């Protein structure tokens, strides 16, 4: 069933497909991808997804949906299914969504990738308590909250065990309403190799948790991490970080002229993915590729409905199927 309604961008409603028996279906990924005019969905929470193993990008670009069916009811299926290991792009640019069903009950023990999960969900004011998730096997959580510009606080993700995570780049980027962060100083960051733009354009943050405690065993990318943080008063003492061999642009880009009264609207994309993430992504699907080639225009137009949406969809499919 993958791509069944792909880019049906003028559809406002669907027939009642909730009555379908999908008990033998294995792939519902990108099912509604690019259905940018849909204002409601049938109650697909009734579906038996017991054999589904591909679900990524399910609601990708459904930018007119304000509510979703209660897919928290899928918990029993997901919790008994060891095959689902990728929920990336699931709510990508669902920019009118006012709430997310309580997916905190989903068993994430086998998940490897949650990148772009809530990317561009600019109307969400709160999230389910995903601090309860077991993230022991997750390697990629880049862009997970990027563009959630109405969120004022996050679940207490300080509890997450980050020991196997490789990429947290752009994680909180453009979360322009966040006034505080959980105490992420507690995270085990030893395997992380990319935190580019992690706090970029968090323009209301006054303080950053004491990330000077973070330790890294690999070279790491740290470009633009505080860029556009125009309200920040104190930077943690990251002078203790040994950056002598790290992949950075210049010393000036670590702490940019980010005390700028006019934070930028866009961000620079990071198109380089580590070999480790590529290795793990290949274990998800042989043809699955993580390139993260998101251009500046896509960040500047979260809520627009212009031709750039078609370009984003094309990029998305290039990423997954090239």
Image (spheres, rainbow, N blue to C red):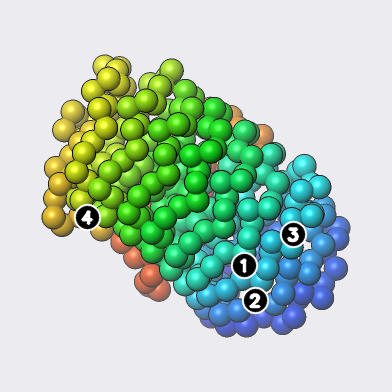
Mark 2 and mark 4: Cα distance apart in space: 35 Å
Using a 10 Å C-alpha cutoff, classify the residue at mark 1 as few (fewer than 14 neighbours), some (14 to 19) or many (20 or more): many
Q: Nearer the viewer, mark 1 or mark 2?
A: 2
Q: Is residue 148 left or right of residue 199?
A: right
| Secondary element at tag 1 | loop
Label 1 with label 2: CB-CB less than 8 Å: yes
Label 2 with label 3: CB-CB less than 8 Å: no
| Secondary element at tag 2 | loop
In the rendered image, residue 47, in percent from the top left (x then y), is placed at 79, 66
Q: How many marks?
A: 4
Looking at the rendered structure, which numbered label has been put on residue 41? Answer: 2
Using a 10 Å C-alpha cutoff, classify the residue at mark 3 as few (fewer than 14 neighbours), some (14 to 19) or many (20 or more): some
Image vertical order of residue 301 relative to residue 247, above or below:
below
Mark 1 and mark 3: Cα distance apart in space: 17 Å
Q: Earlier in the sequence, mark 1 or mark 3?
A: 1
Which residue is identified by label 3? 74
Which residue is identified by label 4? 264
**Residue at x-position 66% and y-position 71%:** 69
Q: Is residue 159 left or right of residue 264?
A: right
**Residue at x-position 73% and y-position 68%:** 45
Using a 10 Å C-alpha cutoff, classify the residue at mark 2 as few (fewer than 14 neighbours), some (14 to 19) or many (20 or more): some
Q: Is residue 88 left or right of residue 267?
A: right
The quadrant in which the N terminus is found is: bottom right
Q: Nearer the viewer, mark 3 or mark 4?
A: 3
Q: Earlier in the sequence, mark 4 or mark 1?
A: 1
Q: Quadrant of residue 312?
A: bottom left
Q: Earlier in the sequence, mark 1 or mark 2?
A: 1
Which residue is identified by label 1? 32
């Amino acid at each position: 069933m993958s791509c069944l309604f792909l880019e049906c961008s003028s559809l406002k409603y669907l027939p009642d497909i909730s009555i379908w028996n999908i008990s033998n279906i294995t792939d519902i990924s990108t099912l509604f991808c690019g259905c940018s005019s849909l204002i409601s969905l049938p109650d697909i929470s009734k579906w038996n997804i017991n054999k589904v193993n591909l679900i990524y990008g399910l609601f990708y670009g459904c930018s007119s949906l304000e509510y979703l069916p209660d897919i928290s009811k899928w918990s029993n299926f997901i919790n008994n299914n060891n095959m689902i290991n990728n929920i990336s792009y699931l709510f990508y640019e669902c920019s009118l969504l006012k709430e997310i069903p309580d997916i905190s009950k989903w068993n994430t023990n086998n998940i490897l990738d949650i990148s772009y999960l809530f990317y561009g969900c600019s109307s969400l004011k709160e999230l389910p308590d995903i601090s309860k998730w077991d993230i022991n096997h997750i390697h990629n959580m880049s862009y997970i909250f990027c563009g959630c510009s109405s969120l004022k606080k996050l679940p207490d993700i300080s509890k997450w065990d980050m020991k196997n995570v490789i990429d947290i780049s752009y994680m909180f980027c453009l979360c322009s309403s966040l006034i505080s962060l959980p105490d992420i100083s507690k995270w085990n960051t030893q395997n992380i190799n990319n935190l580019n733009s992690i706090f970029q354009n968090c323009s209301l943050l006054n303080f950053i948790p004491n990330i000077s405690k973070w330790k890294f065993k690999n070279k790491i990318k740290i470009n633009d991490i505080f860029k556009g943080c125009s309200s920040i008063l104190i930077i943690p003492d990251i002078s203790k970080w040994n950056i002598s061999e790290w992949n950075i642009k210049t010393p000036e880009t670590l702490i940019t002229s980010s005390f700028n009264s006019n934070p930028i609207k866009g961000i620079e994309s990071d198109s380089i993915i580590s070999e480790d993430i590529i290795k793990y992504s290949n274990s998800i699907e042989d043809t699955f590729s993580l390139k993260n080639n998101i251009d500046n225009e896509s960040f500047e137009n979260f809520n627009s409905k212009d031709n750039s949406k078609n370009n984003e969809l094309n990029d998305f499919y290039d990423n997954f199927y090239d």
